[in-house]
Amino acid sequence: MSKELNLLRSQIARIVGNDPRAIRAFEALFSQTQTIIPSNVHDVEISAANAEAMAVQAVGAIDRLASAVELLALIPVQPTVVLPDDLTPPYVMDLAGAAGTLPVGSIRWNVRVLTADATAAVGDFCDCDTTGGDVDVTLPDPTLPVNVGREIMCGKSYSGANDMTIIGTVSGVVNPTYAAQYSQVVLVSNGVEWISK
């Protein structure tokens, strides 16, 4: 881009006519334009470079976010398990097919006091109140991927003649029954059946 117009007055007169005031106004206009345009063009070039740099940063951030989302998709969702902020070994939770392991400090149980028959979910601690009668706790399907490697705890914390019965197979025993107060069992799905710990 030329910094100067380099037009003769006769050439300007052909554009704006022979009026001396129009010629001077034209010259004044273009003298102003010559001082403004170069800096504005430079500003536009800087803005374009900044926009390009910001776009590259945004694409990088999107790539990192996509990678994080892909990793999260590998971890099965378990809303009743709360992992503490201070995750420290030696406890390790298997991620059910995901590469690697995740160290955990403790598992927070979803405590349910049951006074009637109910179906347990992984992460539940079923505290069976048998004062009003027998309480049956039905186990979920141990072969479902969401249950594999997960735990359920059941306990009878009340005295009396009534029983707590686990409906399902536990370590090869079908529908085990617990009569004694403070009987408890922690169950883990191995993908085939529930095993007592």
Image (spheres, rainbow, N blue to C red):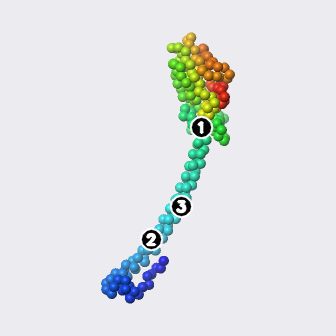
Of the residues shown, which amino acid type is indicated by label 3? Ala
**Residue drawn 67% across the image and 23% down it:** 171
Q: Which residue in the structure is indicated by mark 2?
A: 40
Residue 20 bears which disc, if any? none
Contact (Cβ within 8 Å) of mark 2 with mark 1: no
**Residue drawn 57% across the image and 34% down it:** 78
Cα distance, mark 1 to mark 3? 37 Å
Of the residues shown, which amino acid type is indicated by label 2? Asn
Cα distance, mark 3 to mark 2? 20 Å
Of the residues shown, which amino acid type is indicated by label 1? Pro
User: Can you give x and y, in whole percent of width and height, for residue 81 in the image?
Assistant: 56, 33
Depicted 91 relative to depicted 117: above or below: below
Which callout, 3 or 2, points at the residue further toward the start of the chain? 2
Residue 53 bears which disc, if any? 3
Indicate left or right for 89 with 12 as reference: right
Depicted 5 relative to depicted 44: above or below: below
Contact (Cβ within 8 Å) of mark 1 with mark 3: no
Q: Which residue in the structure is indicated by mark 1?
A: 76
Q: Given this view, does label 1 or label 3 mark the residue nearer the observer?
A: 1
Q: Given this view, does label 2 or label 1 mark the residue nearer the observer?
A: 1
Which residue extends farthest bottom? 10
**Residue drawn 37% across the image and 83% down it:** 15
Crowd tier of the residue under label 2, counting other residues whose Cα lies within 10 Å: few below 14, some 14–19, many 20 or above: few
User: Can you give x and y, in whole percent of width and height, for residue 193 in the image?
Assistant: 65, 26
Cα distance, mark 2 to mark 1? 55 Å
